[in-house]
Image: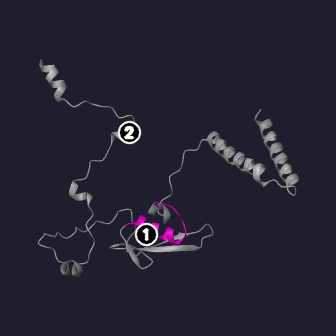
């Protein structure tokens, strides 16, 4: 084999990233860092038998620099300004409903559950009002298509199953009114 053929075999193949997000992958964490250490207080840790295994205390975690100072009370408010729930930033985490959570998001999940929200995940900074939710790019035509699909589906379901002899004239009048409004908008565009 020539020197170039040998280099081709030993040199890793370079691939270009299709977008910027795949080009900057974070390095994988070492195997021992993947498993979370259980949290115990010093007296509890001393009382537990170790079965001869060496137990290293968990390193103290540094607080997230985005969090406000310990003692700050964060409140979730409704659209009218009434407080729905609140938590307190502490040295060891976030206190919500007499329980300390490790992260703002886990406290937000507990609060969301208490409020009856069914989210599977919750951004704590957004939930507690420390940051605004990311804006979706707005495409007016795509939004119009989505609105039409919802409207059309609702009207179809109403016509199929909701029209009775008593409300037939009201449903027909409502659809005629919608047609007139849409027709006037179409004339403005044309």
Q: Quadrant of residue 89?
A: bottom left
Numbered range of the magenta stretch: 103-122
Q: Is residue 163 magenta?
A: no
Q: Tell me what residue is drawn at x 40 percent, y 68 percent.
A: 68
Q: Tell me what residue is drawn at x 78 percent, y 40 percent.
A: 185
Which structural element holds mark 1?
A: helix
Of the numbered discs in the image, which one, if any, rests on residue 107? 1
Q: Give the CA distance from mark 2 to mark 1.
A: 32 Å
Residue where numbered disc 2 is placed:
20
Q: Quadrant of residue 102?
A: bottom left
Image coordinates for residue 35, horizontal then vertical, percent = 26, 61
* Nearer to the camera, 90 or 48: 48
Please identify the quadrant where the C terminus is shown: top right
Image coordinates for residue 71, horizontal then vertical, percent = 40, 76
**Dots 2 and 1: beta carbons under 8 Å?**
no
For marks 2 and 1, the one nearer the N-term is 2
Which structural element holds mark 2?
A: helix
CA neighbours of label 1 inside 10 A, class few (<14), some (14 to 19), many (20+): many
Image coordinates for residue 163, horizontal then vertical, percent = 81, 53
Q: Is residue 116 magenta?
A: yes
């Amino acid at each position: 084999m020539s020197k170039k053929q040998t280099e081709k075999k030993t040199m890793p193949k370079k691939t270009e990233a299709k977008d910027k997000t795949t080009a900057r992958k974070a390095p994988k964490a070492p195997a021992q860092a993947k498993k979370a250490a259980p949290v115990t207080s010093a007296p509890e840790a001393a009382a537990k038998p170790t079965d001869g295994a060496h137990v290293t205390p968990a390193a103290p975690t540094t607080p997230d620099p985005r969090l406000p100072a310990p003692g700050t009370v964060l409140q979730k408010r409704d659209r009218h300004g009434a407080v729905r729930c609140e938590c307190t930033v502490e040295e060891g985490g976030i206190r919500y409903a007499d329980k300390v959570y490790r992260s703002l998001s886990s406290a937000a999940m507990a609060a969301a559950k208490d409020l009856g929200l069914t989210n599977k995940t919750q951004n704590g900074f957004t939930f507690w009002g420390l940051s605004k939710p990311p804006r979706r790019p707005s495409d007016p035509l795509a939004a119009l298509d989505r609105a039409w699909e919802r409207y059309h589906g609702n009207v179809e379901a109403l016509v199929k199953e909701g029209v009775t002899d008593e409300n037939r004239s009201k449903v027909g009048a409502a659809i005629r009114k919608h047609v007139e409004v849409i027709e006037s908008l179409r004339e403005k565009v044309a």
